[in-house]
Image (cartoon, rainbow, N blue to C red):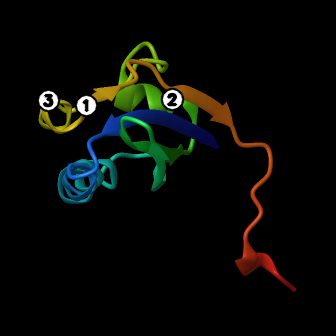
Amino acid sequence: MIARLWRCLAAPDQAHKYIEFFEESVFMDLIQMDGFHDAYILQHPHPDGIELTVLTFWESMEAVRAFAGDDPRQAVVHPAAQLILKSYDSTVTNYEVLRDFHTSLRP
């Protein structure tokens, strides 16, 4: 499994707009893609606004490439999202998930 991590910065009054856009548009596209598993949006206060971290999980690097293109490090940022955000990373970090610990796996 691959965890794909991307960061962006939103004005305090715009962060909710990005989250709504992600939920209503981006996520709807992602769940239709083969190999997509999950998505999380994390937030953290930042001196210039709200830092959002988007963490998505994919079955394989092949699934990531089907989404991102030939360069899996390239961020995919919808033009509508670009208008909402103050700034965003042009690249992502892809992590190989070594272990998966869930509370649902408790004995």
Is 62 in front, or is 103? 103
Q: Amino acid at mark 3?
A: Pro
Where does label 2 land, which residue? 62
- From where the camera sits, is residue 63 visible? no
Gap between marks 1 and 2, in whole Å?
31 Å
Where does label 3 land, which residue? 79
Gap between marks 3 and 2, in whole Å?
24 Å
Helix, strand or loop at label 1? It is: loop
Is 81 in front, or is 56? 81
Task: Tell me how many marks there are.
Answer: 3
Helix, strand or loop at label 3? It is: helix
Residue at 40% across, 46% down:
34
- From where the camera sits, is residue 103 visible? yes
Residue 5 position, x and y percent, is: 52, 36
Quick one: label 2, few (<14), some, or many (20+) residues within 10 Å? some
Say if mark 3 contacts mark 2, CB within 8 Å. Answer: no
Spot the residue most to the top. Answer: 71
Spot the residue most to the front. Answer: 47
Camera-near label (1 vs 3) is 1
Tag shown at residue 86? 1
Q: Residue 32 vs residue 57: left or right?
A: left
Quick one: label 3, few (<14), some, or many (20+) residues within 10 Å? few
Q: Amino acid at mark 1?
A: Lys
Residue 66 position, x and y percent, is: 38, 29
